[in-house]
Image (cartoon, helix red, strand yellow):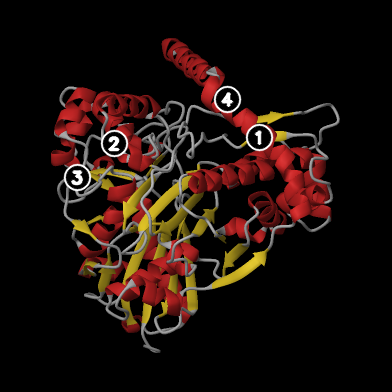
């Protein structure tokens, strides 16, 4: 296998990244990156596609599927060129994607926004994972499921997210029925990109279970869906249901068209699609019970395998074989992490700090981190809630919003920055403790993603959770995980755990908890929990504020249209 290679492609929120990996030992030989030209559509549709910059309502997040194809055409050839290998030595390709990111398509996989006459319809575009405009639909799904005692609801911690397939599909059905009728498949982007590579639509077991409410081989019943909204009863049979592919299986062979895009050899193995978080666990050699992997970037997804099936409140799902075969795969998450730090740096830091950072040869993030690191724990007198993008776990409510408590006229940007770092660690501790209380052990915490570079943040997480913190030894965790699945699909290894042992990389126990610091954080965490339970479980203030904002935006846009 020394002269055999695989390609893993990680489709993130803003860009796609390809990596060429040697099959024998997981050595990463070349990387290519391509930023999505249209990034995330949150304010309006692109005028060059829709004919005009049609404004989008609050909480929307769309993408353009052609941007994903461009990653195959640009990043993959760039990675192969950087690796300096003969493309004919590549034996397989695999991809991972953000989730739940949904593509409405025709029968042949054509996205609706590429259909003549539909480019000006927001619902024809890809709904990105952080599209949170379907919260009302998610609330109705949850309420009806509780009333009917649906057996699948406890597998998702008692709550279905607005980010997932059924809430987004119901929003499409209710807000643009014509587009819904013209849509023939409601496809996870993780599966759509595989469809583009091999010409075959295979629905992966991971997203079907975690995002598509498929449990024990079944989806929510037509009776449930009809009770939810008359006419919606055939959603599963008409739009969703499709043959399932297991993780690490071969979805098909690289088509001639995709071979032309990528520069790879026609006919090589294309692996079944996967989710960026779940595919990272094998890359970190976390294929056994008790190893929680946190993929920390704009958001954080926590995944972990266990030998036991338990109902964990507020988890994002538990799926048999959802990460590796033979174990129950659990998922939880935080909707905003790096996004929150970036938002604060972009919007809450005076120019003087940017100037000081530049003078010191640092980024603003590095500058604030250095200043924050000099503080004693609790010195800022602040506690924050990390809900600027809502709460994924354990409250599963995207009507919630961020809070910083304790500000005075003496509060400075490094204080708030540190409080935000700590808030995300507190959010993770809530998740860890919820798993443990539910009978699912968490014994090791492994971090992947760009935020692992922030040593202060990593030490905070170790201290707050009282867990040894390991770091994946790759800057391309999801892409490496995809490459591992490509090697299995190509037949180089019998299964994912075997491939992970040879190709995965991790540095064990890089950060260890300090008991003195951990005890100091307990006092702040107590206040975090008090705020968490008040605003998340008791008060309706945040929901009312979101409603007021939506009404105000609607009035302003209506007034603008009248003036035009």
The answer to which of marks 2 and 3 sits earlier in the sequence is 2
Q: Is residue 112 left or right of residue 69?
A: left
The answer to which of marks 3 and 4 sits earlier in the sequence is 3
Residue identifier under label 4: 535
Residue identifier under label 3: 218
Q: Which residue occupies 50% across, 58% down?
A: 293
Crowd rating for badge 4 (residues with CA inside 10 Å; few <14, some 14–19, many 20+): some
Crowd rating for badge 2 (residues with CA inside 10 Å; few <14, some 14–19, many 20+): many
Q: Which residue occupies 65% across, 34% down?
A: 528
Q: Which residue occupies 38% across, 34% down?
A: 159
Q: Quadrant of the N terminus?
A: bottom left
> Splitting the image into 4 quarters, where does residue 415 fall?
top right
Q: Is residue 41 left or right of residue 535?
A: left
- Helix, strand or loop status at disc 3: loop
Residue 99 location (% of width, % of height): 38, 48
- Helix, strand or loop status at disc 4: helix
Residue identifier under label 1: 528
- Helix, strand or loop status at disc 1: helix
- Helix, strand or loop status at disc 2: helix
**Between residues 507 and 34, which one lies in front from this camera angle?**
507
Q: Is residue 548 above or below residue 177?
A: above
Q: Tell me if residue 426 can be seen.
A: yes
């Amino acid at each position: 296998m020394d002269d055999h290679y695989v390609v893993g492609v990680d489709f993130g929120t803003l860009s796609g990244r390809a990596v060429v990996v040697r099959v024998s030992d997981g050595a990463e030989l070349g990387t290519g990156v391509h930023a999505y030209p249209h990034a995330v559509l949150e304010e309006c549709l692109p005028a060059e596609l829709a004919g005009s910059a049609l404004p989008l309502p609050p909480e929307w997040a769309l993408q353009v599927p052609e941007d994903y194809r461009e990653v195959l055409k640009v990043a993959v050839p760039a990675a192969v060129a950087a690796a300096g290998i003969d493309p004919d030595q590549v034996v397989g390709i695999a991809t991972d994607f953000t989730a739940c990111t949904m593509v409405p398509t025709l029968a042949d996989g054509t996205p609706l926004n590429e259909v003549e006459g539909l480019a000006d319809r927001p619902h024809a575009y890809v709904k990105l994972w952080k599209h949170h405009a379907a919260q009302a639909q998610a609330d109705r799904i949850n309420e009806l499921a509780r009333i009917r005692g649906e057996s699948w609801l406890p597998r998702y911690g008692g709550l279905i997210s607005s980010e997932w397939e059924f809430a987004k599909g119901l929003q499409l059905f209710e807000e643009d029925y014509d587009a819904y009728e013209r849509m023939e498949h409601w496809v996870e982007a993780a599966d759509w990109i595989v469809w583009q590579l091999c010409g075959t639509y295979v629905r992966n077991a991971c997203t079907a279970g975690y995002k598509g409410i498929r449990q024990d081989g079944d989806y929510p019943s037509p009776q449930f869906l009809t009770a939810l909204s008359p006419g919606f009863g055939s959603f599963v049979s008409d739009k969703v249901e499709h043959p399932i592919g297991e993780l690490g299986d071969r979805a098909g062979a690289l088509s001639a068209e995709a071979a032309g895009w990528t520069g790879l050899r026609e006919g090589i193995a294309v692996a079944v699609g996967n989710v960026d978080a779940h595919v990272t666990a094998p890359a970190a050699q976390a294929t056994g019970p008790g190893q929680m992997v946190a993929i920390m970037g704009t958001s954080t997804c926590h995944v972990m395998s266990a030998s036991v099936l338990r109902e964990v409140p507020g988890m994002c799902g538990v799926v048999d074989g959802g990460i590796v075969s033979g174990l129950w795969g659990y998922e939880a998450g935080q909707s905003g992490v790096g996004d929150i730090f970036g938002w604060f740096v972009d919007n809450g830091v005076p120019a003087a700090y940017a100037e000081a950072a530049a003078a010191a040869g640092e980024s603003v993030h590095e500058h604030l981190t250095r200043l924050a690191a000099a503080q004693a724990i609790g010195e800022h007198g602040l506690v924050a809630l990390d809900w600027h993008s809502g709460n994924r776990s354990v409250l599963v409510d995207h009507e919630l919003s961020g809070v910083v408590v304790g500000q005075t006229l003496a509060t400075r940007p490094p204080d708030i920055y540190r409080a935000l770092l700590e808030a995300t660690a507190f959010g993770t501790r809530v998740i860890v403790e919820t798993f443990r209380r539910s009978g699912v052990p968490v014994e090791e915490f492994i971090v992947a993603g760009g935020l692992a570079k922030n040593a202060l943040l990593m030490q905070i997480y170790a201290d707050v959770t009282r867990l040894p913190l390991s770091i994946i030894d790759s800057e391309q965790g999801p892409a490496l995980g995809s490459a591992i699945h490509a090697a299995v699909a190509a037949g180089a290894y019998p299964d994912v755990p075997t491939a992970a042992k040879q190709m995965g990389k991790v540095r064990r126990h890089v950060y260890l908890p300090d008991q003195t610091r951990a005890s100091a954080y307990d006092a702040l965490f107590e206040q975090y929990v008090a705020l968490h339970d008040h605003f998340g479980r008791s008060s309706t203030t945040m929901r009312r504020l979101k409603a007021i904002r939506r009404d105000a935006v609607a009035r302003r846009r209506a007034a603008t249209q009248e003036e035009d």
